[in-house]
Amino acid sequence: MTQTLLDRPPAGHDPGPGPGMLRRVLARVEAKHVVVAVVVLLLGYLVLVPLGFLLWRTFVADDGSAGLGGFARAFPNDSDTWAMIGNTLAFAFGSMVVSMVIGGGFAYLAERTDVPFRRLLSLSALIPLIIPAILYAPAWIFLGSSNIGLLNNVTGFLFGIRPFDVYSVWGMIWVQSLHSAPIVFLLLSAAFRAADPSMEEAARVAGLGRWRVLTRITLPMVKPALAGAALIVFVQSLEVFEIPTFLGLSGGHYVLTSKLYYLYQEYPTDYQAIGAIGIGLLVIACVGVWLAGRAGGSLRESGTISGKAFRPRREKLGRGKWVAALFVLGYFVLAVVLPLLILLYSSLLKNYEQPSLQALGDLNLDNYRTLFGDSGIIHSFEHTVVVAVCAATAAMVLSAVASWVVVRTRSSGRRLLDALAFSPLVIPGLVFGVALAVVYLRTSLPIYGTLVILFIAYTTRFIPYGMRYAGAALSTVSAELEESAHVSGARWFETMRRVLLPLAAPGLIGGWVYILIVSFRELQSSILLYTPGKEVLSVTIFQEYQDGNTTLVSAIGVVLVVVLTVLVVISQLIAARRGVRNQ
Amino acid sequence: MLKINDVVKKYDPASSGRLRRRGVDTDKHRPALGGVSLRVEEGQFHTLLGPSGCGKTTLLRSVAGLEHPDSGEIELGGDTLFSAERSVDLSPDRRRLGMVFQSYAIWPHMSVRQNVAFPMRVGRDKRPKAEVDKLVVAALESVGLSEAIDRSATKLSGGQQQRLAFARAMVGRPRLLLLDEPLSNLDAQLRASMRLELKRLQSELGLTTLYVTHDQAEALAISDVITIMSGGRIMQQGTPREIYDHPENLFVARFIGSPNLLPAKIDEGSGRRTVLTDIGPLVLDEAVPAGLTDVVLVLRPEDLEPRRRVDGAPGSAEANELSGTVIAQSFEGECIRHIVAVGDERIECRSARHSDVRPGDEVSVPVPGRALSVVDAQDEPH
């Protein structure tokens, strides 16, 4: 019978299931199937395994008994718990509303009116990329704290009042909103550009006033984009760790993320309680996704900015023009100029002093000498570069293949794969950090305590960004270009390498640079997963700040801003070239 | 050469949404291809013609290996390309075909030369560089693109991209050339000249060709054999002349040209040569085949030329002459279109551009017996 394995079955005769069948199945397996299967398995492993472990550790105690004890310990029924939950929701919703008003308002001004200084607005949109939250928070402490805040000094000198307090919940909302308004601005600008102005013109012709056109025509047209932007900002404010820790903790205002971090610092670590908080965060985020979904917004869609752009129709603002211009200028100064200047200024002082003529005389480069002489800081910079480059490469490779399956094939599992690849967006970084710690503390693989665990964390967290870039890049390449290569005799791998990759390369490289940028500022999972001696730059900044070296933080910040600016310029250049190419 | 046996393909859930938006009925009980069989002979120019959503492109893509039918067999030159029963489904790169896509699918990151050379530089039978160079030059010469050989492919005009796509599809001497509406993106004048050139190249090289189009004028002008499809089924197959002169069913009669269609009954007493219509009896040159009773008479406007009746002349008593009044007229450049009221029917006629017939004129319209054909009134596509 061993012969049959080699024999070709007689034509027209169905051998039924058996060795012949197996061999035929194997014969039809191509490189394509192997690559796709490996990527799907990797994605599943990266996303699902940590979440599974987290659930298990939350509901099952060390002695093996299942229960909700973690929730009871994480959320004791006292006033502190209620204050924390109140703070969390107030902070997340407050930041969402304020940044929607700022970002949405400026997007409307920039796209639909003749307000001057529109270029300044698009420039400010780069702020979250160039000044990460971990630097934005210290900068605003120098600007808006009740004791040393520069703005308070100015108003105190002019009017005798000191109204700003960044350590309050309102202060946190303010800083977070300024930082996330640009995302809203970008998403809604794109939506306004893609909304056909002739709809508004028709309404004007039909006799509606300017205000009613805005509320009855324009806003409903961009409703999905509004919902998507609100969702992104909400989830971001829910998971942000830097601002609640730098600002909120000094004022005694806990939110879920800072509470989680606080619990993680205690020994022995109560994984059940930490997991309970993590699940609390996840649940709130998922409710947000569901609510936004009902209004047509999704995390997946927001971000891939598409649709054809129409010739803009700009409202004449008339005399209001200069009031609006003042708002634009004021925003630019508050969101961009002052934080950058105060970082630069404080980095040049050994001990922080209020800006004055005398302080100007004290400016020196001591912090920079310390910085470049400190092997710890230099090493953490190197670690960041290594982890960022590896994670960006891995995330782009995985998401390029996953996107290809989603965009090009009709396999039944592609929607599932898409959902899987985008799910890290709703998992707050701290929660993911805890989950990974749980996984790799338990396994014998030598991963915990190395940079590899950070590499895994970054790769997983940033795959959604990779998916956006790769999805957009692949969908600009017509499927017929691939099909014609395939019919011309090119195998799957040749088609990918010689046709698809060269054409999608600009978008894929753009995504790679973007992930590099966000990797440089990643703190939320790093802070839980690093081990001493293996710090990355964001962790070093956090530690130096905790140690009170605030002006050294500024100096590191200035260097980081320079590096990020270079990366952002590169990615903008790539984006511009891609634009030229698509024409 | 190409044998397609009883190919069935169900609608894909993914593509049916797109088709529904274009108004195609994608009922899941009705497949995209409902058991299609056809033969394409060596050297033949075979056209699949039908309205949007009839399954012609699905069939072409199944031959290319870009779609995967649910059952049936596809054979090319003795090799099985697809067989559901034997679970054979060769990937497109193993089928040795040439294909021109509707969008041309010119690779924008390659030069003209690289585009044409690609099929011979990839896959299982790569050829030596010197040979490739020679073949590329020859292919570009035959489509008249020699001077553009080192230009970037994106710098070409629409017509030139079209030629490049042909050169690329033909360069490796494929066993079968597949053309998916290749002329539909060209403007009308260019389309007419490319049509002739395409036919010339195909017959010079003796390439067996399967061609998809929804443009009947194109199909009639260029094809050796036309297969008309609708709703995933074959409605009729034949030479352009057969299809035009002898539609086999009501669908084909309606789809080709814009004929007058009149319900009619067979007069058994006439040896099945006379049909009775609301506007009187008409005599056909050939007897209506047995088995047909309720029929529809197909009268092509281009066979009917109205003539002004001389005043006082009696209404025609002769067979095969209609009389009526011109109630509308339009000047179309090449010809004049008349709508003639005959009894309660409106009959469309054509005349040469210099006709002196005017709206309101009483006219007689001779009906040549050889121009008449009938189809079964019941024969609607399901």
Image (spheres, coloured by chain):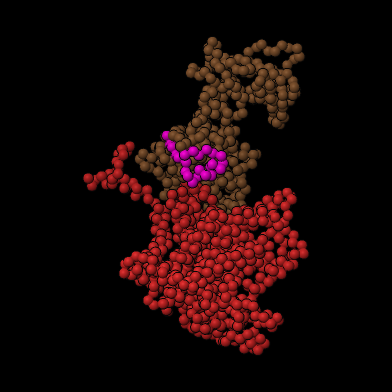
> Could you tell me which residue is drawn at 55 percent across and 38 percent down?
B52
Q: Give the magenta part as a residue range.
A: B6-28
Q: Does residue B12 show up magenta in the picture? A: yes
Split into 4 quadrants, where in the image is the C terminus of chain A?
bottom right
Q: Position of residue B354 (x, y in %)?
A: 73, 25
Q: Is residue A312 visible?
A: no
Q: Position of residue B272 (x, y in %)?
A: 53, 14
Residue nearest the viewer, comparing B39 with B269: B269
Identify the image quadrant of residue A128: bottom right
Vertical side of B75 occupied by A427: above or below: below
Q: From the viewer's perspective, is A11 left or right of B299?
A: left
For chain A, the rendered hue is red
Q: Is residue A14 visible?
A: yes
Q: Does residue B151 show up magenta in the picture? A: no
Residue nearest the viewer, comparing B79 with A72: A72
Identify the image quadrant of residue B335: top right
Q: Position of residue B371 (x, y in %)?
A: 60, 21
Residue nearest the viewer, comparing A171 with B186: A171
> Could you tell me which residue is drawn at 68 percent across and 71 percent down?
A330
Residue nearest the viewer, comparing A384 with A582: A384
Split into 4 quadrants, where in the image is the N terminus of chain A?
top left
For chain B, the rendered hue is brown
Residue furthest out toward the front:
A78
> Could you tell me which residue is drawn at 74 percent across and 24 percent down?
B359
